[in-house]
Amino acid sequence: MRPLVAGNWKMNGLGADLAELATLKAALAGDPPACDVLVCPPATLIAQAAGQVEGAFAIGAQDCHARASGAFTGDLSAEMLRDAGASAVIVGHSERRQFHGETDADVAGKAAAAWRAGLLAIICIGETSAQRDAGTANHICSGQLDASVPEGATGENTAIAYEPVWAIGTGRTPSDGEIAAMHAHIRACLVRRFGEGARAIRILYGGSVKPQNAAQILGLPDVGGALVGGASLKAKDFHAIIGGVKAQ
Ligand code: PGA
C-alpha cells in the first residue's frame, strides 16, 4: 500500500499561487516521492493546476455535489471536477460538516458520486475535543464511518482521513499512542464491514501535520498518509512533509 500525502488548500489560493505547484513539481522531479502526492486547491484553480503539473502529482477537489447535474446553483458535480482534471475529492471535511451542516448521509452521497465519476473519495471523520474528553472518540468515529462510507469501499476508490476536529489548524496533535489507537480502531471497523480487502484502504491522519512532526506521524502503524491543511500551501513545507514518508 503506497501512502498518500494530500494537501487541502481550503479557501486559499489565487492564480499567482500556482507558482507553489511549479516549485513542488520541480522539487519532486529531483527527489521522487515514496508516496502518492495530491494537492486539492480551490475548484477555481483545478483546471489550471492539472494543466500545469502534467501528471507529476495528482490534483483533487475539496467537495462535490451528490448529483451529476441539475438545478443546484453554485454547486459542482464530481463529473465536472473530473472533467476539469481532478482525480480525487475530499468529502465530509469537518468544516463542511460544521459550516454547511453536512450529515453523514450527505457525505455518503458525495462519496458515491465521487466513485460514479471515477474519483478517489477521501472521506473525513473525527471527534471534537468534548467528545474525546467524554471518552466517546472511538464511538463517534465508528458511527461516522458506518454512516459516511457507502457499501463498496475499496482501496482503489476510497481513503479515510482521521482528523480530530480539535487538531485542525490549532497546532495541537494527539499523542502517537492516540493516533495509533484510533487508526487501529478505524482499520478494525473497516475490516469488520468490508472484509480483509479493507486492509488496502489508506487511513490518513490530518490535523496540524507539519514538517517537524510528519515523519513521526507517518511512521505510526496503520497511518497510510496525511491530509495536510495550512502546511500544504507552501511548496517547501509540503515537500518536507512528503519527505517524511520513508521508502519501503
Ligand atoms: P491543518 O488542516 O493541517 O491546517 O490542521 C488539516 C485539514 O483540515 O485537513
Image (tube, rainbow, N blue to C red):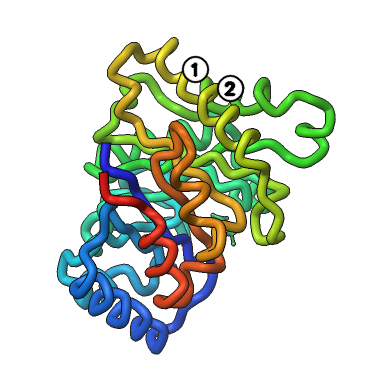
Q: Residue at x 19, y 66 (%)?
A: 56
Identified at 48% across, 73% down, the residue is 233
As drawn, the residue found furthest toward the bottom would be: 16
Q: Earlier in the sequence, mark 1 or mark 2?
A: 2
Image check: 169 left or right of 246? Answer: right
Give the residue drawn at x 50%, y 37%. Answer: 107
Q: Say which mark, if any, is on residue 142.
A: 2
Dot label at residue 39: none
Which residue shows up at 55% across the image and 57% down it? 213
Quadrant of the rendering where the N terminus is positioned: top left
Q: Please tell me which residue lies in front, 37 or 173.
A: 173
Quick one: 35 or 139, which is closer to the camera? 35
Helix, strand or loop at label 2? It is helix
Observer able to see residue 152: yes
Q: Residues within 10 Å of mark 1 (few under 14, many from 20)?
A: some
Amino acid type at image mark 2: Ser
Tell me whether the residue at label 1 lies in contact with that at label 2, contact meaning CB atoms closer than 8 angstroms. Answer: yes
Which amino acid lies under the numbered mark 1 shown in the image of this protein? Cys
Is residue 123 visible in the rendered image? The answer is: no
Residue at which label 1 appears: 189
